[in-house]
Amino acid sequence: MDLIEKARGFAATFHEGEPSSHDMSHINRVEALCMEIQREEGGDILILRLAALLHDLGVIKEHEEGGDHALYGAEMASEFLTGAGVEKKTIDAVKYCILTHRFSGGKIPETMEARILQDADRLDALGAIGIFRSILSMGALRMLKHTTGLDKGSSKWTVYIDDPVEGFNEYMRYKPFTIPEKLNTDTAKRIAVERMKIMHLYLEALNLENEKSKQEP
């Protein structure tokens, strides 16, 4: 088994049962987006694929303990790659990508590989798949609070308000609609334009149907 498939299998063990939107389908889509962007922008394909496959290893630990899954994931990836006999230069490059990928981290990556991973991870929050992931995450977070009392909201948006449609609108304004201006590469920006069209159309239709339901008969 080659290193890429070993990394995919290793990642799968950490994403099994992940309750929100950071499952292996997300990991595989981010990998594919990294490869698509790399064809236009350049960068080391091995570093990119490893970083994409390993970038969310720490998500479950963050769910359980709090903290930052990027920090957890970077160390977990480093341990795996060291054990697989990967050279230190490559390990350090992968760790850097993971440490800078997170949307809420607000970090500006300096290497091409880190810029591409950050873009790919953010692009997966856009378009039809972005809508699906947002709703899936909202449902998981609402259920988590209902069953355990754990509140993972923030001062900027909340999924816990009584009207979930209003919460969805708030989330879209806070995260997906701000993503295009934060992308690093021209390729990612081009992809984002088409994905944003889908999101705007969906939100307009959602709000129209929701408002109709509130009108008196």
Image: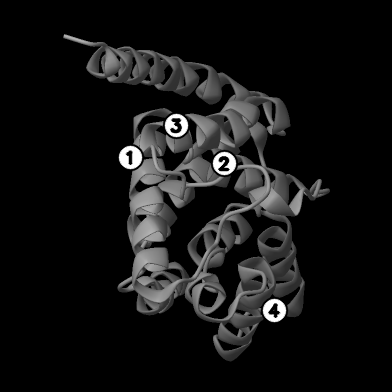
Q: Is residue 194 left or right of residue 201?
A: right
Residue type at mark 1 is Phe
Q: Nearer the viewer, mark 1 or mark 2?
A: 1
Badge 1: residue crowd in 10 Å (few <14, some 14–19, many ≥20): few
Does 17 sit above or below residue 201? below
The image's colour scheme reads: one colour
Which of disc 4 and disc 2 is earlier in sequence?
A: 4
Residue 98: image location, x then y, percent: 66, 62
Label 1, label 4: how many angstroms apart (C-alpha)?
38 Å
Residue 26: image location, x then y, percent: 40, 53
Which quadrant is the C terminus positioned in? top left
Residue 105: image location, x then y, percent: 73, 54
What label does residue 122 carry, if any? Answer: 2
Q: Report the front residue among 14 and 17.
A: 17
Label 2, label 4: how many angstroms apart (C-alpha)?
28 Å
What label does residue 166 carry, if any? Answer: 3
